Image: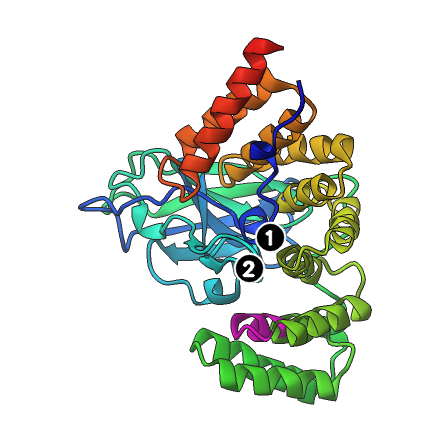
């Protein structure tokens, strides 16, 4: 039976690149202000090579809570505003849809949705190239001991990419001073001063990869997208193993429906680090789907579902669309049903329901 146009993938970039997850309302009496402390260490007992992000995960929804110090120790207060979250690359934010896509915005769940008794919550470390053990917080309350002990990080094999760059250590004093001013301006949510400081940093040291990255973040937050892309490209030119600018680049190029570039960028990230950038698989799937390479799209989408489905339910939807295009109607139908269950309040529910009804007709008649 011929494939019908109702299943033309919603590939307008606005739908494709937004990460849709269910919005959760704050619970009354939630555990805000609870201080959690502990320490990160490698499995040989040594101190981690970089600062480790402290991540709170409640019912599969992850949110950043702060950072360790240089000795791996941390102390964070749950539910308080995280200044570093302003320009964070890992956790989805409310984003505007591209002009060619449906109107509206999507948002990640608020950290304020922390359950009162921390049921289903744990603390872990995030350091690319490493897998973290977890410390369960279920049942913890305000008067319990705040110390979760030592959380061990295990080195992963076959990771060439990194989230830090040696160019920082090589930056001259005037460039580092300007960069530090930019970081402080970000914490104070002052984009004018941040932009000025980061520009000064890269003028003083053109190979300052992280300063180019943060300058791009500022430009992107102000919707100066051409300038943002230029800054990210400079960051990659300064250190081609430094991964965060690649992530911003494939998100921006997907918004512009530049699918060959998206495929190239995501392939680079996956090749350098197949573990720590799960959305690279998601955007790879989108790129290959829009380029009509359905086998490559299915492979990437299945990886996205395996590693990121809880945070990004849309990965399952995209895999369903790919399988529908390949006339694997039964599995596609199951994935769309799961997507509707995961995000019942999505703005595209009616469209997906229509697609599901068509799928079920095809499945019966096949």
Q: Residue at x 33, y 54 (%)?
A: 79
Kindly identify which numbered label has been placed on residue 98.
2
Q: Which residue is drawn at 68% across and 56% down?
A: 250
Q: Quadrant of the C terminus?
A: top right
Residue designated by label 1: 13
Q: Which residue is more in the foreground, 2 or 296? A: 2
* Contact flag, marks 1 and 2 (Cβ < 8 Å): yes
Q: Return the x and y of residue 184 as percentages of the image width and height.
A: 50, 79
* Colour scheme shown: rainbow
Nearest the viewer among 159 and 295 is: 295
Q: Which mark is residue 107?
A: none
Q: Can residue 155 be seen in this view?
A: no
Question: What range of the chain is rendered magenta?
Answer: 216-224
Q: Is 213 inside the magenta-drawn segment?
A: no
Residue at 80%, 71% (x, y): give it: 238
Q: State which quarter of the image contains the N terminus.
A: top right
Q: Is the magenta stretch mostly helix, strand or loop?
A: helix
Residue 213: name its quadrant: bottom right
């Amino acid at each position: 039976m011929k494939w019908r146009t109702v299943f033309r993938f919603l590939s307008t970039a606005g739908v494709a690149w937004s990460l849709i997850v269910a919005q959760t309302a704050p619970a009354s009496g939630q555990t805000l202000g609870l201080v959690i402390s502990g320490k990160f260490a490698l499995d040989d007992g040594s101190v981690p090579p970089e600062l480790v992000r402290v991540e709170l995960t409640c019912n599969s929804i992850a949110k950043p809570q702060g950072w360790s110090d240089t000795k791996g120790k941390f102390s964070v207060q749950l539910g308080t505003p995280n200044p570093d979250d302003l320009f964070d690359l890992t956790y989805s934010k409310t984003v505007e849809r591209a002009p060619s896509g449906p109107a509206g915005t999507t948002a990640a769940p608020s950290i304020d949705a922390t359950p009162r008794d921390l049921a289903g919550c744990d603390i872990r470390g995030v350091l690319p190239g490493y897998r973290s053990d977890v410390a369960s917080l279920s049942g913890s309350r305000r008067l319990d001991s705040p110390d979760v002990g030592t959380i061990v990080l295990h080195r992963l094999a076959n990771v060439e990419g990194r989230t830090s760059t040696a160019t920082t250590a090589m930056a001259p004093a005037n460039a580092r001073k300007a960069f530090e001013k930019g970081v402080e301006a970000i914490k104070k949510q002052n984009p004018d001063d941040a932009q000025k400081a980061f520009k000064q940093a890269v003028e003083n040291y053109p190979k300052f990869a992280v300063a180019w990255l943060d300058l791009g973040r500022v430009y992107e937050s102000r919707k100066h997208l051409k300038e943002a892309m230029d800054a990210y490209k400079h960051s990659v030119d300064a250190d081609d193993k430094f991964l965060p600018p690649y992530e911003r680049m494939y998100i921006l190029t997907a918004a512009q429906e530049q699918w060959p570039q998206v495929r190239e960028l995501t392939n680079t990230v996956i090749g350098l680090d197949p573990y720590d950038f799960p959305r690279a698989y998601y955007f790879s799937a989108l790129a290959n789907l829009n380029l009509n390479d359905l086998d490559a799209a299915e492979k990437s989408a299945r990886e996205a579902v395996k590693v990121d489905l809880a945070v990004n339910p849309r990965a399952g939807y995209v895999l369903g669309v790919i399988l529908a295009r390949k006339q694997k109607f039964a599995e596609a139908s199951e994935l769309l049903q799961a997507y509707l269950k995961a995000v019942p309040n999505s703005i595209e529910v009616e469209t997906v329901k229509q697609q599901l009804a068509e799928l079920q007709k095809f499945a019966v008649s096949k």
